[in-house]
Image (cartoon, helix red, strand yellow):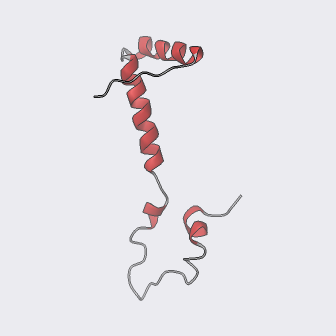
Amino acid sequence: MKRTQILLEEAQYLQLKDEVSATGKSLSEIVRDSIASHLREREKDPLFDIVGSVKSQKDPAPADLGAQHDQYLYGEKM
């Protein structure tokens, strides 16, 4: 592990201390868990949902896939 120092807002610190009391976890453990959760969430990408969806030449990708890839990946624009 690497030691680091962070600055928290007073409200954040108080909320974390409440969670320490409620869970019995250390403040460091709660912060590490939160960072791990954040990083896992960032790794999610709709691109992985389409991996393997194009099977063969009999089932080709849409002709406009290159130009409309965001539409296929993320759906309708808002």
26 vs 19, left or right, is left
The foreground one among 4 and 49 is: 4
Q: Give the residue at the far right of this rendering.
A: 78
Residue 59, image quadrant: bottom left
Image location of residue 77, percent across then percent down: 68, 61
The spot of residue 13 in percent (x, y) is: 52, 15
Residue sitting at the far bottom: 58
Q: Quadrant of residue 57?
A: bottom left
Residue 68 rendering spot, x and y as whole percentages: 60, 73
For the N terminus, the image quarter is: top left
Picture residue at 38% right of the left edge, 21% below the top: 28
Q: Where in the figure is residue 9, as x and y percent of width and height? A: 57, 18
Above or below: residue 18 compared with residue 53? above
Residue nearest the observer in this picture, 45 or 59: 45
Identify which residue, 49 or 13, lies in the foreground.
Answer: 13
Residue depicted at x 38% and y 28% = 32
Q: Say which quadrant the C terminus sits in.
A: bottom right
Q: Residue at x 43, y 11 (%)?
A: 21
